Image (cartoon, rainbow, N blue to C red):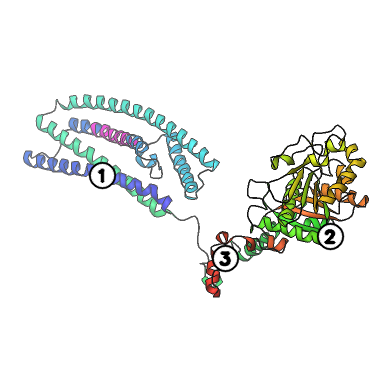
Amino acid sequence: MKKKNRIAINTVKFIDSQISEVSDSLTFAESKLQNFRTSNRVTDISFQGQQSLERMNQLESERALLVMQKKYYDYIRGYFERNTDLSDLIAPSSMNVQDRILNQMIPELITLNSERTNLLNQGNIKNLRLNTIEVQIANLKKTIIENINSNAATTEIALQDINNRAAKISAEMSRLPSTERQLVGIERTFKLNDAIYTFLLQKRSEAQIARASNAPDYEVIDPARYITAYQTFPKRKLILILGGLLGFLVPFLLIILKDFLNTKISNKRDVESLTSLPILGHVFHNESKNKIVISETVNSPISESFRSIRTNLQFYAKDNEKQILLVTSSYSGEGKSFISQNLAAAYALFGKRTLLMGFDLRRPKLFKDFNLSNQKGISTVLINQSSIEEIIQKTKIHNLDYISAGPIPPNPLELIASSKTEELILELKKKYDYIIIDSPPIGVVSDAYLLMGFSDVNLYVIRQGFTQKEAFSNNISHLTQKNIKHVCVVINDVKAKGLAYDYGYEYTYYSEDNKKPWYNKFTRVFSGKKNK
């Protein structure tokens, strides 16, 4: 109803503003006519004067209509310049503008503006329909301005013609007697203002009637009653049920999908699902840049993990005071050499005479971590170019000696398979309590299978988040087929997160006091325990 009545209300406001201008002129002309007739005792005009006055009044009525149309055209131009909202436009028919095209375009412009306003109120700023409406409004405004300019020019020509005709009639009236001529001029002014005033009153009445006759497009047949009202949308129960199902289903699917796509060993459960071999222990992620970490911090978790492995290996010793341990893995990069040198350091710090042998004759690199020489080593002994005493090198760790692989031979597999290898190991076993053999990865070459014949325990190293499940499973199958005994698994590079569940082990138990979480202090206070 507000939208429907807006045009009528704006039309009435515009007409009232014009009436206020004409009303004063009409009152003044009426008073002047009355005073002139009273003072000059003139009550009527001659027949000739009456004819001239009637023709003049007809011209003035026509000019009044043209003047109102011109004001309407000026109003439209000014309105377009001042306003972007076009909802308050006045229809041309209310100002007696008979242009058929303009009478179609103005209502169409108002309708488009109303549709644009509705879209903006709904927040549909990115609606494609809104862009189309904006273009249509711009084009329609441009067409209306062109039409108004054309009509204004035509109106100006018509006004000029009426003024010329009025000038001729005025010339005829100038030949009338002076008193009659003055009376005709006063009456002409009065009747002009009276015609304009009457025209405006008529148009205001029409606008008020149009406003009063407006009716809403919808009718309330049955008013809503609160007692029967219920929410139809959104359906809260359905949303809660769907949300709950999605809350369980989506994470479940993601976990299943992640596990399905994961081809690497992620935790202890993956190892247990792939093999029945015992898990000897696990080694935490190395935070430091040094390779030999067991001799750095006594109470660090990673140092304790090597001590735990050393303790578990005692169950394989039985009554033997000496052991030969072989360390291998699936591929390079799983921490095989890291485990070998730190396990050797753990035995050396335990007071045992320990020897670490770099038996990877194809890619010797363990000597770099000890800053030792690789000019002589296992390969030179096996070809009788060096003696055993010449290849044994002392390390910075007490009780720990090292034998490098030596220069890379052209036939490493044949050298390892020779009888000299057995003689070398038996001779070294007499001198040392523990011999740690750092062998090549069994997933690449078969050197380690030959060396496993000399070892008491074989440590198979896997790296969490790195070792492929398929490679590990295949290599374990090969070990089983070759009847290799005393094989156990060591899990390397274990992250601290989730240890209490995967390994039954609390990471912070082995942390130093200054690295314990801040909330432990509050736990001790509330539990009544004192710091130690």
Circle 2: residue type: Ala
Residue 356 in picture, x, y percent from top left: 77, 47
Name which residue lies at 10% across and 33% down.
Answer: 179
Q: Quadrant of residue 309?
A: bottom right
Instruction: Label 3: state its secondary structure.
Output: loop
529, above or below 484, in the image:
below
Q: Residue furthest left?
A: 39
Q: In the picture provided, is 515 more to the left or to the right than 306?
A: left
Q: Which quadrant holds the N terminus? A: bottom left
- Front position among marks 1 and 3: 3
Nearer to us in this view, 425 or 244: 425
If you read the primary sequence from the N terminus, does the residue marked by circle 2 or circle 3 appear first? Answer: 3
Residue assigned mark 3:
231
Instruction: Say which mark, if any, is on residue 317.
Output: 2
Q: Total of numbered circles in the picture?
A: 3
Is residue 131 in view?
Answer: yes
Circle 1: residue type: Ile
508, above or below 394, in the image:
below
Name which residue lies at 59% across and 63% down.
Answer: 232
Q: Residue 58: say if magenta.
A: yes
Name which residue lies at 48% across and 48% down.
Answer: 118
Q: Which quadrant holds the C terminus? A: bottom right
Q: Which residues are magenta?
A: 56-72
Residue 447 in picture, x, y percent from top left: 87, 42
- Front position among marks 2 and 3: 2
Residue assigned mark 1:
19
Q: Residue 271: say if magenta.
A: no
Q: Residue furthest bottom?
A: 528
Question: CA gap, disc 2 to disc 3?
Answer: 77 Å
Residue 517 in picture, x, y percent from top left: 56, 62
Circle 3: residue type: Gln
